[in-house]
Image (cartoon, rainbow, N blue to C red):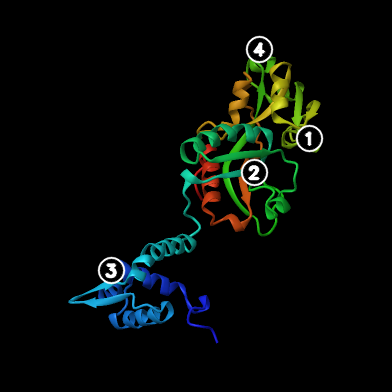
Amino acid sequence: MASRTDPATIDANLAIALDALLAENSVTRAAARLHTSPAAMSRTLARLRRILQDPLLVRAGQTMVPTPRAQELREEAAGVVRSLGVLLSPGGSVDLASLRSTFTLQAADLIGAALAPGLLNLARHEAPGVSFRIRAEDLEAGPALRDGRIDLEVGAIDHVDPETKVEELVWLRMVPAVRPGHPLADGAVTPARLAAAEHVVVSRRGRFTGPLDAALAQRGLQRRVNVVLPSHLAAMALAAHSDVVCLVPAALPGAAASPLSRQAVAFGLRLLDIPLELPPLAIAMAWHPRHTADGAHRWLRGAVRRTLGATAT
């Protein structure tokens, strides 16, 4: 049998009741504070007296006054109740000012370059103790999200495990980009002129073809791909200093400019329109469901959303 002082005999409700009794110095007021009856609070006080072996509150005329032991316990009881409140509060609440965390994101270089300035700016003003690690697309995202090697994947999500949470952020289109003075920049860009130009393709897997080739093939055209690079930024740098054409993501017609186009503009590239229907590109973020309700991770997802100009879904 457990003794009267065995911690197993004490539950959280007793701590909350003790805090209310010592704060109010009144069974009636403590009962009202905890939305219970005076009779129930009287029984709780009797139980506390047995456990602590102290009367805690004693009658003094028309009021009750705390014993020395009760006075010693007052701040400690209040602290325990505050700690319980933090422990049992919803996970969505987080103190951003005191948050100390490093978030690891996996993204292509172009997306990382677009995300980094916005994330740093938001962290500077909202969560100054947060830092970011942006990895190249070198891990299989499903297992990496599951075992915590990455917190968030951002990009074209095409390898989703069943439990992975995915949120589409923004839809983009791919458009040709060329250096100033490039022959394609003079006059209307026709499919034939585009096919006749030299091209650089971005592919981590070394592929020479993509949606543009399928669209050209429907018109009996075939482009020449001179080089395949694994990096969007490297392809843009090449296009800025040569006559190759590079495809870059841009906002859909009528939408606000996408931050994913900023690097192309920084390289001095001109974005061109073409009379071809290319499939739109969905940029999304993926995370493991254990992070869905976590307050810090919710802030991270919101920061990515705001940086890419997306709205919550």
User: Cα distance, mark 4 to mark 3?
Assistant: 81 Å
Residue ID at (47%, 54%): 93
Placement of the N terminus among the 4 image quadrants: bottom right
Between marks 3 and 1 in the image, the one whose residue lies nearer the viewer: 3
Query: Dot 2: within a 10 Å radius of its alpha carbon, few (fewer than 14), some, or many (20 or more) residues?
Result: some
Using the image, tell me which numbered label, if any, was put on residue 33.
none
Residue ID at (64%, 27%): 274
Q: Which amino acid does label 4 sit on?
A: Gly
Query: Dot 4: within a 10 Å radius of its alpha carbon, few (fewer than 14), some, or many (20 or more) residues?
Result: few
Q: Which residue lies furthest to the left in this view?
A: 62
User: Cα distance, mark 4 to mark 2?
Assistant: 40 Å
* Residue behind mark 4: 181
Between marks 4 and 2 in the image, the one whose residue lies nearer the viewer: 2
Labels 1 and 4 touching (C-beta < 8 A) = no
Q: Residue furthest top?
A: 181
User: Cα distance, mark 3 to mark 1?
Assistant: 76 Å
Give whichever of 41, 73 is nearer the camera: 73
Secondary structure of the residue carrying numbered label 4: loop
> Can residue 148 be seen in this snapshot?
yes
Give whichever of 312, 295 is nearer the camera: 295
Secondary structure of the residue carrying numbered label 1: loop
* Residue behind mark 3: 24
User: Cα distance, mark 1 to mark 4?
Assistant: 26 Å
User: Cα distance, mark 1 to mark 2?
Assistant: 31 Å
Using the image, tell me which numbered label, if any, was put on residue 104.
2
Between marks 3 and 2 in the image, the one whose residue lies nearer the viewer: 3
Q: What residue type is labelled 1?
A: Thr
Mark with earlier residue (1, 2) = 2
* Residue behind mark 1: 209
Mark with earlier residue (4, 3) = 3
Q: Looking at the image, is 121 positioned above or below residue 288?
A: above
In the picture, measured across the screen, residue 308 lies left or right of residue 234, that is left
